[in-house]
Amino acid sequence: MRSPLVLITGATGAIGPCVVAELCKAGYAIRALSLDMPPHGVFPKEVEVCTGDITDPATVSTSMQGVQTVVHMAALLHNLHCQPELHEKYERINVGGTANIIKSATLAHVERVVFFSTIAVYGASGGSILTEKSQARPDTVYAKTKLAAEQIVLSAKRWDGLPLGTVLRLGAVYGPGVKGNYQRLLIALAREKFISIGDGRNRRTLIYDKDAARAAVLAMQHPLAAGRLYNVSDGQFHSISDIIQTISLALGRKPPKFSLPAAPIRFAAGLIEDIAKLFGRRMTVGRATIDKYVEDIAVNSERIQSELKFRPCYDLKAGWAETVEQMKLIR
């Protein structure tokens, strides 16, 4: 008897290989769709690899044939310095691509579409704790388009009238394959070239990549997940200071002793940013960078724990220890 076939979009992205591995372990057949061919050895040999663009309806329709479930991760990811000319691209990929997935899934009688979204749709928590009932206040083009895509997924119906989709709003995902702010933080701490900004008490909501993959399998399988929205995290709120200390411990380094006050650093960065604009240049660190570093993001994930019995396997210490080990950073 043939194993149920799962289509994974964005399978070569940072989290993709973890999701593929978890689904293979659970006994599913996998069809991996991505823009480019994966590097050799990234996926088990039994994975069916397809290349194509989710904005192309014909590609999506062909990839959907024979599929029972979809895990939709393909997206244009967050860019802190998003230029106006990229706005249309975000709409086309994150919103239009998701609409293509849902339309083809409906026509192909797919049973469930699990959509990877982000807690970035909430915006900053401002000292409160956010839940799935909190109002979304996205403050970036990325977050706005992910919220629009969520609405497409949650409003979709199967052939039998039941809800088609489940949305997972992931906390900040970290792990050996993840790029972005946490990769930069890890490398800076490894090279002992990091100085903290602010008092370090602002909170973050995180999830290890393997736990995010486990949440996807639960959302695929559990009957209660249909039509539901879940925040996904390790169940804790971590201060920036705690994260830095945990990474330093995993690296075998001493945490940085000094921190700089946020307000004057933001002023100085903004001044340099404004001067650079006069000469047609863009700085990698400006006001938005400082604001993002010191913002408070505390998102509750009790719903997925209660309804789907999700239990993260990795706490902060275990997750960063494995990340450092697999990235082969000097300890």
Image (tube, helix red, strand yellow):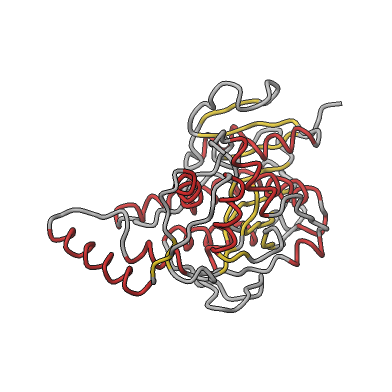
Evaluate whether residue 138 shows in this view: yes
Quarter of the figure with the C terminus:
top right
Q: Position of residue 123 (x, y in %)?
A: 50, 69
Evaluate whether residue 151 shows in this view: no
Q: Position of residue 317 (x, y in %)?
A: 67, 52
Classify residue 266 by image quadrant. Answer: bottom left
Q: Position of residue 248 (x, y in %)?
A: 56, 51
Q: Vertical placement of 66 versus 123: above or below?
A: above
Q: Position of residue 164 (x, y in %)?
A: 70, 54
Q: Residue furthest right?
A: 1
Residue shown at 65% from the left, 61% from the top: 154
Residue shown at 48% from the left, 49% from the top: 189
Q: Could you say which is closer to the camera, residue 91 or residue 124?
A: 124
Q: Could you say which is closer to the camera, residue 253 or residue 6?
A: 253
Quarter of the figure with the N terminus:
top right
Residue shown at 68% from the left, 41% from the top: 108
Classify residue 62 by image quadrant. Answer: top right
Residue shown at 77% from the left, 53% from the top: 160
Q: Could you say which is closer to the camera, residue 222 or residue 205?
A: 205
Number of disc labels? 0
Classify residue 44 by image quadrant. Answer: top right
Q: Vertical placement of 120 versus 264: above or below?
A: above
Q: Vertical placement of 306 versus 220: above or below?
A: below
Q: Is residue 103 left or right of residue 315?
A: left
